[in-house]
Image (cartoon, rainbow, N blue to C red):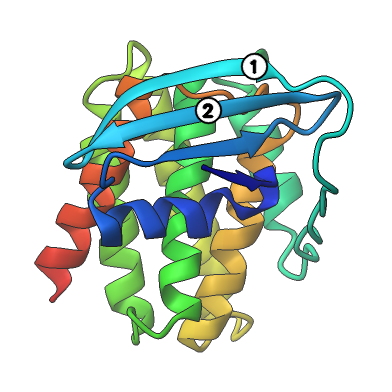
Amino acid sequence: MKYLPYALIVPVMLLLLTALLQADEIIVRIPAGTNYIKITGDNLKVTKATVIDLGTGDPPIDPGTPPTDKFGLAKFVDTEADKVAKEDDDTRTGLGLIYQLLGKQIKEGKIEKPQTAATAAKTAVDLFLTRSKKKAEWQAFRKALEAKLEGLSRDGKIKTVADVGQAYEEIAAGLRQGQDEFLSPELLELILKIIQLVMELLG
């Protein structure tokens, strides 16, 4: 059993992918109070994700450092996403996690070209949105975001794959703005499988 701050949820997800969720338990801190999410899984299937309260004596929490909004994408994304779902919405939260995971893959050198990153994001988002009740609205959001990214690229602001990684971190931050950030076991499992599938396709 491990205690991990919510800021480490992305490396946790990648760890789960690598280890195929070998019947371990991971506890993730929710950003306020003493609540944690306990995730239990086996063979790439999340079997349980519950909120628990550990009370006093919980481990020190590193809140992490939010990305700087270098390209202005966090604010743009928050505004555009509010048009679809301003209140807590698992699709919005899930999209944020997808972009955060892809940004992590770029940082680790597993995605080496801007176009490959764009293909990965489009594929992952399209697959994820098949389960959304607001699929058309979120697709419109995705197209607006793609247009924004293309404009930044044309202006020479986004050039390298590292720039794309920064952009994805900003997008994730914008999508998480004001959200509860709790995902059901089914949604966690779906996101894990989507990222795994996308990385296999890219390979």
Residue 52 circle label: 1
Crowding around mark 1 (Cα neighbors within 10 Å: few <14, some 14 to 19, many 20+) is: some
Is 132 drawn above or below residue 43 in the view shown?
A: above
- Residue at mark 1 to residue at mark 2: CA–CA distance: 7 Å
Residue at screen point 84% across, 27% down: 32
Could you say which quadrant of the image residue 62 lies in? bottom right
Q: Nearer the viewer, residue 122 or 106?
A: 106
Above or below, 70 relative to 140? below
Mark sitting on residue 132:
none
**Relative image position of residue 104 (x, y in whole percent):** 49, 67
Secondary structure found at label 1:
strand
Q: Residue at x 25, y 40 (%)?
A: 126
Quarter of the image containing the C terminus?
A: bottom left
| Residue on which disc 2 sits | 38
Q: Nearer the viewer, residue 164 or 15?
A: 15
Residue pictured at 35% horizontal, 51% vertical: 16
